[in-house]
Image (tube, grey):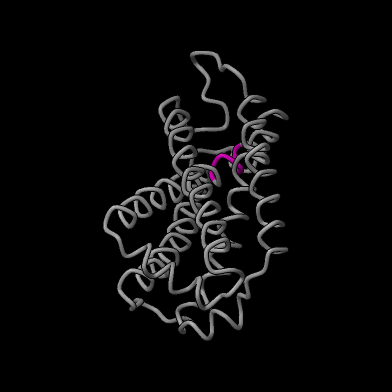
Amino acid sequence: MPRFRSHIALTVWPLAVLFVLELARLWPALRGASSFAAESPASWLSLLIWTALVLGSLAAYARGWSMLGPLPAESAGPYRSNGCWRLQKLAGGLAWALVVSQLVLHWVMTVRVGSVAISQYELLREFLSRPVVMAFYVLCLGALGLFLSQGIAASFRAWGVARRSESSRWLEIAGTLTSAVLLLMAINVLSHFVTGRAYWMGP
């Protein structure tokens, strides 16, 4: 059980934190370029800090899966089944593809236009409106939502919160709803950059 807890702590929660932080950074864009520039200023220092955070989280993710190690045929670790365990690895890979792609995009934008948030906002709108890029983001966001949904449920199992099947089911529902809300918020931001509109403009 301790290695299950370490696995969850190193794989699920760092990625969840990165997702929430990036969502919070992009959310002001819903109110326009000036709001984005005012509330999410760009700088080389913030980019370097974000890069270190992403690389550290990626190293933790790799360490977390190595700590889990090979599981017996009859065991799925903290996950519901072996199928869920394999699906979690696939979803995690796609989620990290999104995180790394977004980091590379940050670097490209900063090198191209400097640490000017308004210029980066315009580049984001131009880049994300491409159909192939939009499809990639939607696919990876869906994988990230699945990863977090299963990861939250696995967290409860690893810490022994959901011992009964009924409580486990309700906790899984709670995890699914939480990840669904975050996913819809991310799709809302993506919709703004792709179409110039969003379903909800935020407070």
Q: Relative to the observer, which residue lies in front, 125 or 138?
A: 125
| Residue that protrudes farthest toward the front in the picture | 112
Query: What residue is rendered at 45% in x and 79% in y?
Result: 30
Q: Relative to the observer, which residue lies in front, 83 or 104?
A: 104
Q: Is residue 33 left or right of residue 8?
A: left
* Image: 198 above or below 176: below
Rendering quarter of residue 4: top right
| Residue 114 image offset from top left, x and y in percent | 59, 68
Q: Which residues are magenta?
A: 153-157
* Image: 9 above or below 47: above
In the rendered image, residue 90 lying in the magenta stretch gets the answer no
In the rendered image, residue 155 lying in the magenta stretch gets the answer yes
Quadrant where the N terminus lies? top right
* Image: 8 above or below 24: above
* Image: 84 above or below 188: above
| Residue 9 image offset from top left, x and y in percent | 68, 41
